[in-house]
Amino acid sequence: MEVDHIETFLAIVQLGGFTQAGTRVHRSQPAISRRLRMLEAELGAPLVERIRGVVRLTDVGRAFLPHARAMLAAHHDALEAVRAEVSGGGREVTLAAVGTVLDARLCTRLKEFRATHPEVRLRVKTASSEQVSQLVRQGDATLGVRYFADASADVTARPLGAERMVVIAAAEHPRLAKTSASLEQLAAETWLGFPTSKAYKEAFGRLLRMRLNRAGLERVEIMEVDSTQAQKHLVEAGFGLALLPHSAVAPELTSGTLKIVRAPRIATRIPVTLIMRKHAFLSPAARALSELVNAGAPT
């Protein structure tokens, strides 16, 4: 079974199409289709089907998917193990992280790693929490830093700390002149939150609803917005309030376009977790990076 055939299949699944997969693996669409057909011929069953232009996994494809990820990850491990043996430490380490976790503290640790390991190429990929886990599971990232825990059986997780979730409002909000608000004032506001229907943001969508419900604000209006940046812009424009990671709104708090509204029954903390693939090979450089990431985690 060819590694590039498996890589092609995974790219099609992750990106949702043949054209996008071709861009990822630097192949033409006919070449992508040919590699998929060869893999399906070897397995004796179709892995994907196109329904109204949308690529979907067949039952066989769904059964094969976790094994394909494991095979590609094992291939990456084998290469890394050989490189580490030859070079004495490993030549490349990839960290996948949620963008807002890459604050000044963690970036300082990454700078330290580059200074102490000049022979190692450190690559950083930003993604959503679910995408971070996926990159780690399939071997495209050595380590991952994400929000919330990952219950997958094929990864190990290390708690790093917690991120403050704060209620934010426009700096010139007409009804919230002070930094604190009563439940009555909060109930009168529209809230901006992530859709629960989007898998990779589902935890954040549920979190807002859970915090509002616990505060007795079950009936408030929630405007679903599937982007942190868009939520911030809409709050700045006076469309309502949002519950977001403090690190995500730090620039706006500094510039004065947003302010934190004191709402203890809604504000909370969410866990930040370091993940790696279970039984994965970790070069000395990767182990050193994991310790530095641990030291640079939010508290």
Image (cartoon, rainbow, N blue to C red):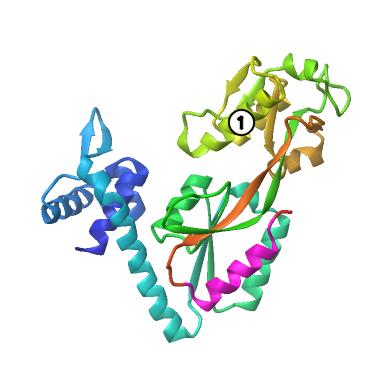
Q: Nearer the viewer, residue 286 or 263?
A: 263
Q: Nearer the viewer, residue 154 or 5?
A: 154
Disc 1 is placed on an element classified as helix
> Is residue 77 placed above or below 234 in the rendered structure?
below
Give the percent coordinates (x, y) of residue 81.
Answer: 41, 77
Quadrant showing the N terminus:
bottom left
Would residue 292 be counted in the magenta stretch? Answer: yes
Task: Count up the numbered dots.
Answer: 1
Give the percent coordinates (x, y) of residue 26.
Answer: 32, 55
Q: Nearer the viewer, residue 161 or 124?
A: 161
Over which residues does the magenta segment extend?
282-297
Q: Residue at x 30, y 62 (%)?
A: 71
Give the percent coordinates (x, y) of residue 46.
Answer: 16, 44
Q: Amino acid at mark 1?
A: Ala
What crowding class fits label 1: few (fewer than 14 Cα within 10 Å), some (14-19), or many (20 or more)?
few
Q: Residue at x 27, y 37 (%)?
A: 55
Magenta highlight: main SS: helix
Q: Residue at x 12, y 56 (%)?
A: 42
